[in-house]
Structures are given as C-alpha cells and as structure tokens.
Amino acid sequence: MTTSHDYPLIRCKGLTKHYRKGRQTVTPLSALDLDVPRGEFLALMGPSGSGKTTLLNLIAGIDRPSEGILEFDRHEIGGLSRGRLARWRAAHVGYIFQLYHLIPVLTAFENVEIPLLLSGLSRRERRERVENALALVGLADRMHHVPSELSGGQEQRVAIARALVTDPPLLVADEPTGDLDRESAASVLALLQQFSAEFGKTIVMVTHDPRCADAAERTLHLEKGKLLEAEEAL
C-alpha cells in the first residue's frame, strides 16, 4: 500500500508546453514524465533551449502547462487559474534566482520580510521568522545592511533566507551559483544540501555547472524537451 509519505511530492505526466513565436509554435517540453520524491535535491542540466528553465517554472507554478498532468502532493496544480496558482505558489514555493532580485534600498531584514507582508502574521511573528531565516544562512549579524554593503555570496544567502521564510516544502533554484566565486558557490550549495538533509526541503535546481550539480542527490539532463538520466547524457 502506497502511503502519502511514499508518494512523490511532484509528479509530471505527459507534461508539454507550447509557445507562440511569431507564426511558429515552439515546444520546449514534450510529453515529459518526472517524479520528484519528498526531500530530494534534484539538479536539472542541459544546453540552452533544452527546456530546463521551462520545466522549473512549471514546477514552481510560475507558468502553466499546455498539456499533461502536474501534481504537487497529490493535488493537480497545472489547471489552476493564474490567481489560484499565485496563491498556491506563495504558500508552497521558495524561489532562488541567479541575480538575487533584492531591493537595493531595503535592508537584508526587510528584503527577507517581503513574502510575509500579506501573510496575516503579527509584526512580532514576522520579526521572529525573519531573524530565524537569516540565522539559518549565517547572516544574523548583517540583517540591517543593504545589498550594496554585502558581498555577492551574502546577497545570495539573503535571497535564500527570503525563499525559506515562509517555510515552503519546495525550493526551486535557477542557476543559484552562476554569479558567485567558487568559495561563495560552495557555501550556497552546502546550505541547500543542509536544508534538504536536515529540514526535508525538496529542492529542484537548474544549473549549467557540473560541479554545482554534484551537490545534488540526482542529476537529470534535458535534451530538446526530453529527460535523460546523467549516465545517458554522457
């Protein structure tokens, strides 16, 4: 008997995405099947145009599939309206971008607090959550600094704290180390590994860097919208 815990957190069946580009129809994903177990750290690799960012955006609820089934925790989300999808995303997904997307005039604390402002939490509850999230990424002593006063690695850790502050079950990361030096990149990857191993976060990461992908438990390669296991892509 399959329990809820055994069932994958993310299940894609026949997932397809079409875009119109002028008079042409572009299909970056075609009939893709994928299961992502709870707590897994998954890396997605592939050349430009392979569909990896399209897949990440579908999993994160940023976009909707053209065809197929997309389930999260046994609930179909692919067919939700844009409004309902936005509410689902706010409750379930933390997004980590390559270029941080921090607001320059806000402090680290204020940047991390942004996802909580419409949550209904009291000011004290928001403060506790933000302080805890910044402590988890090792920036408790930098919370009152604006982004220009932080290194690139510290800015990315602020972005990770912002993704964590709502305690979402899923973290999605789009080239999270692409703008970092090797030492800062290693620090960010170690944090992601910790959140998966210790806190049970499911992480789906897009990267072009094999060293970055090595931090994940499993690596899949996309070629023209199709998935390959790492060994098949060699």
Image (cartoon, helix red, strand yellow):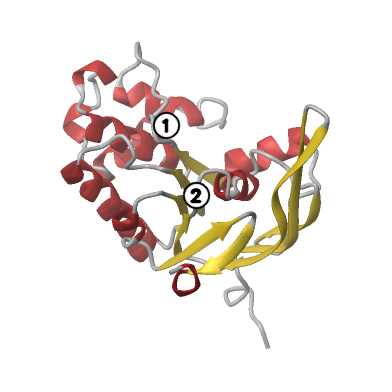
First in sequence: mark 1 or mark 2? 2
Left or right relative to 114: residue 194: left
Whether residue 146 can be seen here: no
Percent across and percent down for residue 16 are 75, 53
Question: As shown in the figure, which amino acid type bears the numbered disc 2?
Answer: Pro
In this rendering, the answer to whether 88 lies above or below 41 is: above
Q: Secondary structure at mark 2?
A: loop
Mark sitting on residue 20: none
- Residue 47 is labelled as 2
Q: Residue drawn at (38%, 61%), measured in percent from left and top?
A: 196
Mark 1 against mark 2, which lies toward the viewer? 2
Give the side of residue 29 with respect to residue 40, left or right: right
Residue that mark 1 sits on? 126
Determine if residue 49 is in view: yes
Q: Secondary structure at mark 1?
A: helix
* Of 2 and 121, the residue lying toward us: 2
